[in-house]
Amino acid sequence: MPDHLAGELALAALRALPTPKLKEIWNTLHRRIHDPKAHPEPGDYDVMDNIRKVLRDREGPELQSGREMVVEAMRDMFTNGVD
């Protein structure tokens, strides 16, 4: 399958998920990327970018910035621990 089609399918699948599930996936990937013991997959960054696009489409750019997502992920990581 060509890369551009795979990317469109992945984005469509993310759009079908509810917002809380998207944020949960984003937080999990963020933890994995920044955990020194974990080994992030090459596609993790692409998935995070796609989730950010979907959330901005839903909530608007002023409601959900990348910085807010990072702050939320860090707060969650320090209060709940790393998986």
Image: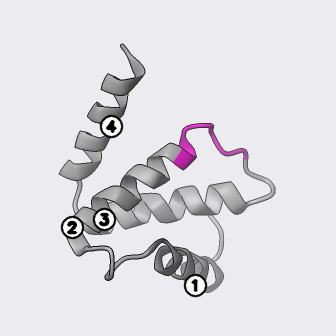
Q: Position of residue 78 (x, y in %)?
A: 65, 83
User: Is mark 3 in CB contact (under 8 Å) with mark 2?
Assistant: yes
| Residue 22 left/right relative to 49 | left
Which mark is in front, 3 or 1? 3
Q: Which residue is mark 3?
A: 55
- Compared with residue 61, is residue 18 higher up or lower down, i.e. above or below? above
Comparing marks 2 and 1, which lies closer to the viewer? Answer: 2
Residues under labels 3 and 2: Cα distance?
5 Å
Query: What residue span does the magenta drawing correspond to?
Result: 39-45
Q: Residue furthest front?
A: 61
Which amino acid, by three-letter code, is at mark 2? Arg
Residue 5 coordinates in the image, percent (x, y) = 31, 24
Instruction: Specify which label sits upstream in the sequence, 3 or 1.
Output: 3
Q: Which x, y percent locates residue 26?
A: 46, 60
The amino acid on which the numbered mark 3 sits, given as a three-letter code, is Leu
Seen at 29% across and 58% down, the residue is 54
Which secondary structure is most common in the magenta stretch? loop
Mark 4–mark 1 distance (CA, rounded to whole Å): 28 Å
Magenta-colored stretch includes residue 18: no
Query: Residue at label 1?
Result: 75
**Circle 4: element type:** helix
Q: Residue beneath label 4, please?
A: 10
Residue 79 in the figure: left or right of residue 53: right
C-alpha gap between disc 3 and disc 1: 19 Å
Q: Earlier in the sequence, mark 4 or mark 2?
A: 4
Q: Quadrant of residue 37?
A: bottom right
User: Mark 2 sits on what residue?
Assistant: 58
- Residues under numbered marks 4 and 1 in contact, where contact means CB atoms less than 8 Å apart: no
Which amino acid type corresponds to the residue marked 4 in the rendered image?
A: Ala
> Dot 1, how many residues are within 10 Å of its Cα: few (below 14), some (14-19), or many (20+)?
few
**Residue drawn 62% across the image and 39% down it:** 41
Q: Which scheme is used to colour this image of the protein?
A: one colour
